[in-house]
Amino acid sequence: MPRYLEMQDKVALVTGAGSGIGQAVALAFAKQGARVVVSDINTQAGEQTVTLITELGGKAIFIKTDVSDDAQVGHLVAHSVAKYGRIDYALNNAGVTQNSQKLAEQPVETYDKIFDVSVRGMWLCMRHEIDQMLKQGGGAIVNMGSMSSVVGIPGLSTYSSSKHAVLGLTRGAALDYAKQGIRVNAVGPGTIDTPMIQRFIELAGSEDVMAPIRAAHPIGRTGRPEEVADAVLWLCSDASSFVVGHMLMVDGGYSVQ
């Protein structure tokens, strides 16, 4: 194991860890020896992630959390510290997407739901995580952006604007706390093969619906959750000790076209 990925007895907090990228990151932390706090709004999904970690011989707890609720996020961080003593790493991954729809056709509820979870929720998580990391002398935070953080995508204006906000939150917080030992960065995944993609294929009734999506990525395929997890762990590790306020694109070249 590379020295910089040695995370034995460190503590990692992952929101939205019940499936997809969040689950892959939680498992990756556990494989490197970290104790993992699994957070999700879906109890069954979150507990399944804990089961997968314990089957690997790792240590994890599940804390159900609606990240848009300040009291629940405060409880998440406080309970994590009560159990494990500190929070060394945090992936703020919880978020929601939208159905493809032009802006003027979107109901106000779409905007409210996306920004409540993906922006307010991330802001609340960072606020409580940073407060704890200041007390313990440092830590690393990674926020979940998207290729939509840096480019526009037709039909996804609200989702894209929320992901642009993630980049702003990341850069601002990074500058606020870099001198106090807290590194804040982000990842920007392209289309990743998650359960959400599988549901998209099922609704379309054909695997063919993915062909133009894969073709839109210069690498010629969609990504794997584990590939995003590798980027998150690198950003948390000592290998990225001079990386601050950066969004690491993991998008198969989509955003550089």
Image (tube, rainbow, N blue to C red):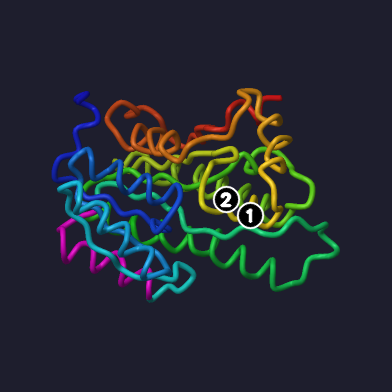
User: Image height check: is 12 above or below 81?
Assistant: above
SS for tag 2?
helix
| Mark 2 closeness class: few <14, some 14–19, many ≥20 residues within 10 Å | few
Q: What range of the chain is rendered magenta?
A: 72-87
- Looking at the rendered image, the quarter that the N terminus falls into is top left
Element at label 1: helix
The foreground one among 134 and 9 is 9
Nearest the eye: 212 or 236 = 212
- The residue at 28%/45% (across/down) is 139
Residue located at (51% from left, 42% from top): 171
User: Split into 4 quadrants, where in the image is the C terminus?
Assistant: top right
Identify the residue shown where x is 40% and y is 60%: 127
How far is disc 1 from disc 2 in space, using C-alphas? Answer: 6 Å
The amino acid beneath tag 1 is Glu
Q: Position of residue 239 (x, y in %)?
A: 30, 26
Residue 251: image x %, image y %? 57, 32
Q: Residue at x 23, y 40 (%)?
A: 31
Residue 106 occupies quadrant? bottom right
Q: Which residue is mark 1?
A: 202
Magenta residues: mostly which secondary structure? helix
| Residue to which mark 2 is pinned | 198
